[in-house]
Image (tube, rainbow, N blue to C red):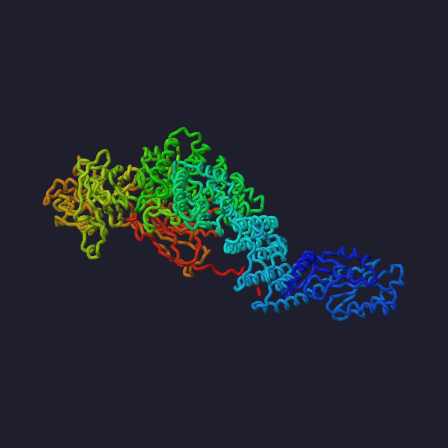
Amino acid sequence: MANYLAQFQSIKSACDHIVISVEDVSDLWPTVKNAFEERLPFKRAILNNKTRNPVLVDKFPAEFILTTDARLRSRFPQEQLLFWFREPYASIVLVTCEDLDEFKTILKPRLKLIVQNDEREWFIVFVSKAHPNNDQAIKMAKKVYARLEVDFSSKKRERCCKLDIHGPEPNFWEDLEIKIIESIRNTLDKRVQFYEDELRKLSELRFMPIWNFCNFFILKESLAFMFEMAHLHEDALREYDELELCYLETVNMTGKHREFGGVENGDEEAALLNFENKPLTQIVQDDSFREFEFRQYLFACQSKLLFKLNRPFEVAARGYTFVISFSKALTQHENILPFCMREVWIITACLALISGTYSNYNEGLAAPDIEKEFYRLLGDLYSLCRVKFMRLAYIIGYGSDIERSPINSASLSMLPWPKPSVWPSVPPDASSEVLAKEKLILQATPRVKHFCILRKPLPLEPSVLLREANRRRASLSAGNTFEMFDGRSAIDGSGSDAPLRMSSLNKAQTISMSRTNSSPGFDGSIDRPMRLAEIFVASEHALRQTISNPNLWKSLSSVEEFEQKYLELTKGAADNYHRSWWKRHGVVLDGEIAAVFFKHGNFDLAAKSYEKVCALYSGEGWQDLLAEVLPNLAECQKILNDQAGYLSSCVRLLSLDKGLFSIKERQAFQSEVVSIAHSEMEHPVPLDVSSLITFSGNPGPPLVLCDGDPGTLSVTVWSGFPDDITLDSLSLTLAATYNADEGAKALKSSFATVLKPGRNTITVDLPPQKPGSYVLGVLTGQIGQLRFRSHSFSKVGPADSDDFMSYEKPTRPILKVFNPRPLVDLAAATSSPLLINEAQWIGIIVRPIDYSLKSAVLHIDTGPGLTIEESHVIEMESYIEVSQRPGDIANSNSALNDCSLADNKDFERLSLHDGRIQLPDWASNVTSILWIPVSAIDNNLARGSSTVNPQRQSIVDGMRTIALKLEFGVSHNQIFDRTIAVHFTDPFHVSTRVADKCNDGTLLLQVILHSEVKATLNIFDAWLDLQDGFVHTGKGDGRPISGFFPLIVSPTSRAGILFSICLGNTTAEVEDVAVQPESLLNIRYGISGDRTAGAHPPVTAESNGSEGARQDLIFRSTLVLQQPVLDPSLAVGFLPLPSDGLRVGQLINMNWRVERLKEFDQNKDSLCNDEVLYEVNANSDNWMIAGRKRGHVSLPTEQGSLSLLFAYTFHLTEYLVAFCHHKVFHIPHFCGVLIIFFIVTGSRIVISVLCVPLVAGYVRPPQLGLPDIDQANISCNPPGPHLICVLPPALSSSFCIPA
């Protein structure tokens, strides 16, 4: 079967679609050919795949070929089975007949002969030539077609269809297409089954000696090619994948030695997408194929199918994996392959994959994630190609032109050298090239970095090339090895130590030549180790023989061409990475592009690329890499005169770890910053130094202030500068955490600040802030003309401490300003009254509420009627609040129930200056009490009252006020104002009553003394100066008849004094004495009390008197004695209400009877004896009273006086007055009429009021009052009940509904 390999290859190239054979029985094909071929390709076809699942194929291609065509003839039976995939998949039989007899005798036997082959899928197309106007021909054609259907069609399958040339059937072409697709589907299923059976048989023999992979390959690819012709590309791809796995098993089988391939000219250029690169007959080896060519062929076939499936992404993914795996196979056979065959093949393979996949990729059609992954694969291919290309350039001496960047060092230092069996030797005629290479090596000087930064060059090789190349020389079996290892420092032809390296090489060559030539049996021209320039030249000549692609060799022909190709590959990788997920890889490669731009003086583009790289390294925290790139960016910015960018780069260099740069280098960075800051800057811009100068609040709790308080804020600033630096100005902003809309507030330092390296503590003045919590915002300042800002917090201390600041933790507040709250409280020490007209201590309790009162000043301003005794000092003592136990309250006479003075208390005497007192320092944080001597003045005498009509002095009369203003706080910015009311009173309230009236006219007058203070009063003497009309009985000295003095009156208790008096007229006896209208009570007393409880001895007595001495005080009170006080003149009574009760809305009469008991005082006006003023009072919510509520009534003194009726009408503005003897007028009730009857009988009168109750329930009735008559002269006042019952209104018939 392997002998048919060439024929199989030619058949594949000639046949690429499904064939449909046409059996033209009646010579109809020329007539219908165009109509048939216009239907190709078929719009839709449903075929079965290998697993017998239907697959929809759009635009299915096919070809109609006559059975008489040479392409379907001259085929041997064995060929038909082997290459069955090229045989027709359907057979169309074209017939026509116009006579039924002709059909039976000629056409039918011939058709039977044609369709007797059961392996073919056939159907008959009957072509009718009957003209539409020839009815006889049409009928005959129908009969023939009907007979044709009967003979060749069956119920299971319809095998006939009719085509009318002159009038085509409307569904013919659709029916024809269905029959063709059905025939193709059936044929395809049969042939797939055949190939599967054959392949199964061969697979069973795979591990036997008779196994032949070529036979398996022909059958397997025939099946795959048949699927491909049927546009079942998924199944074809699956067959090629299985074929590849089977081949790899065959290759890995031990026991057979097979050639690898790849040694022919042009094999170094990969053929991953060119399956026609070599014929299969050229790569066949015994029963299999050479691995190098065949694996590429299989991948090319797979790629072709993936492109047809519109899956270039998968081609790239498979291609990258294939390149990596196939390079390992190349490494295993590297000793038999041409020099650097692996590197060249990888470069060409990557470029071919990039070109092929990108040209077949339609951007925007794939999903976003697939698209990004596709560009990532292209970036990987570019990167792999770039690394291999740099390796080739290094081997031929371009190492000094390769940037020694971290990415290049990482890629090339891990890439092994080529491992040929023998390292190439220098051609005999290449001495001039060697000298040129040596000259280039000597001229190569390393570029000095900006700021004179010294760094050891990063390696670009896995080991010393000089040693590796000489070790692989076949003739190096003995000789001087010093020269090989002396070149250890000569890694390549570049670097800062190139002159030193070359001098050592020359010296070593001289020594080694003498020693080698002296060695017996060796020729110095052969055994001498190669120099580095010779290695470069030998590698270049060998590589020129390996590379057959002129474009690739052109890119290695010169340094300029190399840099152009290197830039092209780097840009391709970076651009694709930028469009993929791996954007960081693209940024890193931008740095390599920037190095090329920098080398050629394109500093603008270099700076832009370096900025991207630095941003990436800084964001990822790769400080080692940043230290390599950032000086290059700074140099570009300085050349471009970008002062802002250059300053920023210097600050970032200073912000890196201190171990990355030496002290001198860091000082150079700082000197650049200071130099530019103090120079004339063209465009001053703020510089962000967040990574260099950081700040935080001091350890511990935040500063706590109250609303309106200034303060001093202490902040820790960390400087990353290596030396001291002077900040001409410095300011901090505070940000409120409670309100995002609140603007930041700047705190400025008024003097220059010198920051030392490391930790610094600075203080700034803090003006009053609004209530809330504040955090540090931004640190700003100025160095010379340079404005800088920092918004970073210091990360100091362990991670679990309060000093550690991180962006994951919430920012710790540095300042808390409380909402307006009570900071201090001023209150009176006691609420009990003090003595009026006497010097008393007023206690002011000063209570700080979690706030210091240091250096506080208290302003005191007394109100009217109150003065400060300036002759006495002000006392201040500590005060402690304690809760008393119930037993203490019972046994205590103190006025304080919840507080007391401390036993061990602070005490100090203070002076009042212009109404101001400065509080001592010991009282700044403790509660204290301030004793102020004051005196309340009242020139009016106290007035007594009667027990019949008790009247006490109003508390307002003894009230005095004292205004206090306390200034406190850091700068006395806090002010607390309070006005304290102090109650002053007389020691006694006097009331009188007549205890008894003797038969001889003597009156026993009892004077009751009510204690008004919470202190013990001692009464030593008392006397009464009587008013005119009263005289004392007995001795007549005005002393009481009860002489139990001294009389002790406890707090809030009473005492009584009894005087004996009688009626008399003293003014007639003593003409010279003025008439005294009021009596005067005189009391000489003393007081013993505590100032913490209330009233107490006067200040003079406390300060001057000894403990046993006493000071008597005088109290005077006026008494008004009226005579007679036990003889009323009038009696008022409430007459009973109707017995049937009261209802809401019912008119009723309220009646009162007024009776004269005796004559009024003769000294009074006669009018008062005749007329009495009355007044009716009622709640308007409960009662409606019609008419006048106030008026005068006549109260006659004789019997038989006229009765008076007074009527007042609202609606009629007229008065009706009637006089009659002993008769009452009855006037009809009008709405809104008040009728008041005065019925007089002798000295009695009845007052009647018409009223209406408004609410139901128990209500207070109207009350009758006599305003002009003293209450002492009225008996039974107020008359009447307190409450009466009012019933709800009766039901009205107007609301009833008739039955």
Nearer to me, 887 or 970? 970
Q: Is residue 567 above or below residue 369?
A: above
Pinpoint residue 1278: horizontal percent, then vertical percent: 33, 52
Pinpoint residue 585: horizontal percent, then vertical percent: 49, 47
Pinpoint residue 164: horizontal percent, then vertical percent: 83, 60
Q: Which quadrant does the N terminus fall into?
A: bottom right
Say which residue appears at 26% left-offset and 48% top-offset.
950
Say which residue appears at 60% left-offset and 50% top-offset.
356
Q: Is residue 416 left or right of residue 1198?
A: right
Q: How many numbered marks are there?
A: 0
Pinpoint residue 154: horizontal percent, then vertical percent: 77, 70
Please identify the quarter of the rendering in which residue 496 is found. Answer: top left
Say which residue appears at 55% left-offset and 46% top-offset.
545
Please identify the quarter of the rendering in which residue 845 is found. Answer: top left
Q: Is residue 411 visible?
A: yes
Q: Is residue 623 visible?
A: no
